Image (cartoon, rainbow, N blue to C red):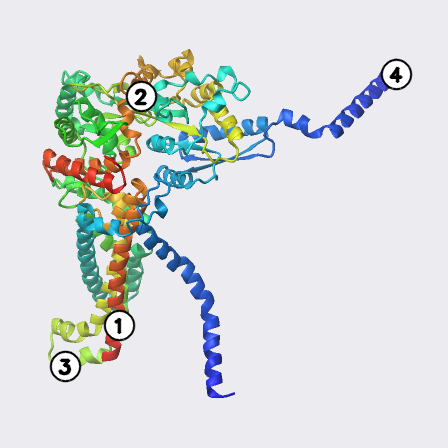
């Protein structure tokens, strides 16, 4: 058989092997996304029969978005939640990984223990924090009372509600960055730090000049992953604050949820969701681009 | 011998009777079965949100299945889940359900959009509805949401909610020389004076502000819409509405910390344990301070009408109904079920056997048995419940704001604006002016002509 014949056969085999997966992927991911985009071009209201197929002003919903103060505010809230949440998760995850990067049975047990929040179902995490943040039953408030310290109701306070969500989100996802950084730390050859020690470097200098350059790509990658994932903080917001007080913790996906399921504005909610999808897709593409750039530079 | 002969003669007679019966059954099997079990072979699909009423009803359903021959498949989901599913199903013209719960907040929407079957066609037919079922026995105030503009009925109520005021710590009030508040001003004073005494909060509430707030707004003469259901221009920034918002925000200063995020359960728990004195909510949530075994304040509790405003006395009330989707496959069977589930007999059994008092049949609420079961420490809870439940049907239907299809949009805006006022983010006037603009923009966006 000629070489081109083998190539054609290989291509045909690859196509045959990939087709079922692509069909499934198309059905579960692409079709709903297409439906979402199509719906966003209509004024679809559950209470208005026929509105699902009204394409008379297809870009009406998108035109309304910039003038909707709640949508604009929700993007800002999402940005604050994502930035602070990711920053704390990366920094604390890194610190925890540095602390626990030693060989000991106790530390091994502690590592497993620290992973628990990440494997809990999100709604369980939300319930745990609901208990912590509820003044009448929370041990936190009880302790504060014993110390004669008055704590505000965190989830209904304008100043603390978003912080309360960030703390809970950080608790839940810190193990992810911890795990990633710990894995990276364990790949650093000991020779580098030993050589630096011989040259008289302090521990801080070793961290700054040896360890950090090694783990920086992992920090960036895990930060980007968490940034993408941070738009999914829905259960925490749903259970802890319902987006309040006012719109202080109302992120974009929660606003889209209210529009779709509380007020039945499916078309407009789809437009909000499409914008969110584009933003997340943009971040994902940046992540892919960074990965490729890193490979090219290596 | 004599006995043997009689025995033999009986055997022959029995044999003859059995032969005749067998012949008759062979000749006319179906009509005979149909006469005994008219809906044999039918599976009735129904849906509602989870509620004690249905949990109790499920205990009686085997009796209904036995009598009619049909099988009842009742799907119960969480309140928001059910509302979403049913709304989607009915709006898309589906026929998956034969009967549904007509949720109060969706009632007007479903009735106006023609998504439900007209039940007058069933009650008006003597073959389908016996006179003793008496549709007029349902409390008129509870039936208002299920009627269209022409007065046709699309649902019958199985649950009524009447806003009452529960006071858990009358002992503290008496110590301070305070009387049960009857006006908004007195309510404010009582809450402020009790708050902090023995660690008790003056009042408790929960996060569904667009349910808790309107009685205060209406009490000062305001409303959510200008004149619902005919004029649905939002009226969120009128001086009366702003006054109501400011009043309720001030009232919550006497509430436990974090009350803005309280659920109904949290609020109820705070009065059952005596940690909060006043709770103003539907009877089913308030009366447990007197009736529930969990209550630690039975001896010091009172349940009364909520205080009246300076302009109106409009305690909220609502109801939940059973209806038949327009495209249901088994309408007659569904009506048979609704007729049975809301019959005087089942309603009375629910009251007597399970203490379920939020029924909507007047004859049951005013019965001696009901009164006996629902009179605690000399307080006739049934009379209070009936009094409030009837109010929307007397004169102006002040609950109409809640049954118009535009309410969820405006209610959501109201919720957010109130929290901004209660947490001091904005003065009431600014928050409500912004809310008015947002509500109008949101309604226009949703295609509402204002």
Chain letter of disc 3 in the image: A
Q: Which residue is mark 2?
A: B290
Q: Are marks 2 and 1 on the same chain?
A: no
Between disc 1 and disc 3, whose residue precedes? 3
Residue B340, image x, y percentages: 50, 24
Chain letter of disc 4 in the image: B
Q: Nearer the viewer, mark 4 or mark 1?
A: 1
- Mark 3 and mark 2: Cα distance apart in space: 78 Å
Q: Is residue A27 above or below residue B60?
A: below
- Mark 2 and mark 1: Cα distance apart in space: 66 Å
Viewer-nearest residue: A145 or B384? B384
Q: Which mark is residue A291?
A: 1
Please indicate whether residue B1 sits to the left or right of residue B441 in the image. right
Q: Which mark is residue A198?
A: 3
| Residue plotted at (18% across, 18% down) | B181
Q: Which mark is residue B5?
A: 4
């Amino acid at each position: 058989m000629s070489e081109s014949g083998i190539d054609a056969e290989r291509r045909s085999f690859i196509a045959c092997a990939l087709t079922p997966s692509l069909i499934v992927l198309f059905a579960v991911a692409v079709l709903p996304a297409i439906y979402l985009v199509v719906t966003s071009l209509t004024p679809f209201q559950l209470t208005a029969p026929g509105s699902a197929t009204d394409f008379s002003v297809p870009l009406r919903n998108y035109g309304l978005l910039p003038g909707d103060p709640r949508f604009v505010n929700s993007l800002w809230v999402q940005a604050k939640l994502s930035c602070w949440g990711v920053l704390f998760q990366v920094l604390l995850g890194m610190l925890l990984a540095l602390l626990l990067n030693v060989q000991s049975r106790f530390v091994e047990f502690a590592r497993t223990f620290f992973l628990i929040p990440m494997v809990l179902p999100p709604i369980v995490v939300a319930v745990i924090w609901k208990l912590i943040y509820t003044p009448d039953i929370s041990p936190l408030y009880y302790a504060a009372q014993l110390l004669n310290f008055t704590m505000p109701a965190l989830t209904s306070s304008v100043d603390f509600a978003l912080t309360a969500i960030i703390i809970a989100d950080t608790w839940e996802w810190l193990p992810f960055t911890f795990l990633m950084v710990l894995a990276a730390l364990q790949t650093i050859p000991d020779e580098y730090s030993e050589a630096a020690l011989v040259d008289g470097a302090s521990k801080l200098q070793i961290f700054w000049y040896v360890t950090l350059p090694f783990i920086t790509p992992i920090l960036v990658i895990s930060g980007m992953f968490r940034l993408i994932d941070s738009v999914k903080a829905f259960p925490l917001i749903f259970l802890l604050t319902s987006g309040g007080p006012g719109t202080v913790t109302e992120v974009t996906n929660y606003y889209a949820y209210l529009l779709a399921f509380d007020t039945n504005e499916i078309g407009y909610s789809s437009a909000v969701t499409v914008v969110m999808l584009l933003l997340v897709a943009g971040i994902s593409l940046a992540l892919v681009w960074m990965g490729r750039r890193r490979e090219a530079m290596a | 011998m004599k006995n043997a002969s009689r025995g033999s003669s009986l055997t022959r007679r029995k044999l003859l009777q059995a032969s005749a019966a067998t012949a008759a059954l062979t000749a006319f099997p179906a009509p005979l079965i149909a006469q005994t079990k008219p809906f044999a072979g039918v599976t009735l699909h129904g849906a509602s949100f989870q509620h004690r009423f249905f949990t109790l009803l499920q205990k009686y359903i085997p009796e209904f299945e036995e009598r009619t021959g049909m099988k009842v498949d009742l799907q119960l989901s969480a309140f928001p889940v059910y509302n979403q599913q049913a709304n989607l199903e009915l709006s898309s013209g589906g026929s998956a359900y034969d009967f549904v719960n007509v949720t109060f907040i969706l009632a007007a929407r479903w009735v106006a959009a023609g998504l439900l079957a007209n039940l007058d066609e069933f009650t008006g037919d003597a073959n389908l509805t016996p006179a003793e079922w008496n549709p007029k026995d349902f409390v008129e105030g509870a039936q208002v949401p299920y009627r269209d503009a022409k007065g046709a009925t699309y649902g019958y109520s199985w649950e009524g909610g009447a806003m009452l005021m529960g006071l858990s710590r009358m002992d503290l009030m008496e110590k301070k020389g305070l009387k049960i508040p009857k006006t908004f001003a007195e309510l404010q004073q009582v809450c402020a004076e009790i708050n902090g005494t023995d660690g008790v909060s003056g009042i408790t509430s929960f996060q569904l502000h667009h349910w808790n707030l309107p009685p205060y707004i209406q009490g000062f003469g305001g409303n959510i819409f200008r004149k619902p259901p005919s004029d649905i221009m939002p009226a969120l920034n009128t001086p009366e509405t702003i006054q109501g918002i400011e009043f309720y925000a001030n009232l919550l200063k006497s509430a436990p910390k974090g009350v803005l995020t309280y659920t109904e359960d949290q609020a109820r728990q705070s009065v059952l344990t005596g940690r909060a004195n006043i709770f103003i909510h539907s009877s089913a949530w308030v009366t447990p301070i007197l009736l529930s075994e969990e209550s630690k304040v039975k001896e010091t509790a009172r349940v009364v009408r909520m205080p009246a405003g300076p302009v109106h006395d409009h305690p909220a009330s609502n109801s939940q109904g059973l209806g038949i989707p327009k495209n249901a496959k088994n309408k007659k069977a569904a009506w048979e079920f609704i007729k049975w589930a809301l019959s005087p007999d089942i309603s009375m059994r629910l009251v007597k056997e399970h203490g379920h008092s939020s029924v909507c049949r007047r004859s049951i609420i005013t019965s001696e048995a009901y009164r006996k079961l629902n009179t605690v420490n000399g307080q006739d809870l049934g009379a209070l419940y009936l009094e409030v439940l009837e109010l929307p049907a007397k004169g102006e239907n002040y609950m109409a704001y809640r049954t118009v299809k535009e309410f969820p949009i405006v209610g959501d805006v109201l919720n957010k604006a109130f929290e901004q006022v209660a947490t001091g983010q904005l003065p009431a006037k600014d928050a409500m002016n912004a809310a008015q603009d947002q509500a109008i923009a949101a309604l226009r966006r949703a295609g509402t002509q204002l």
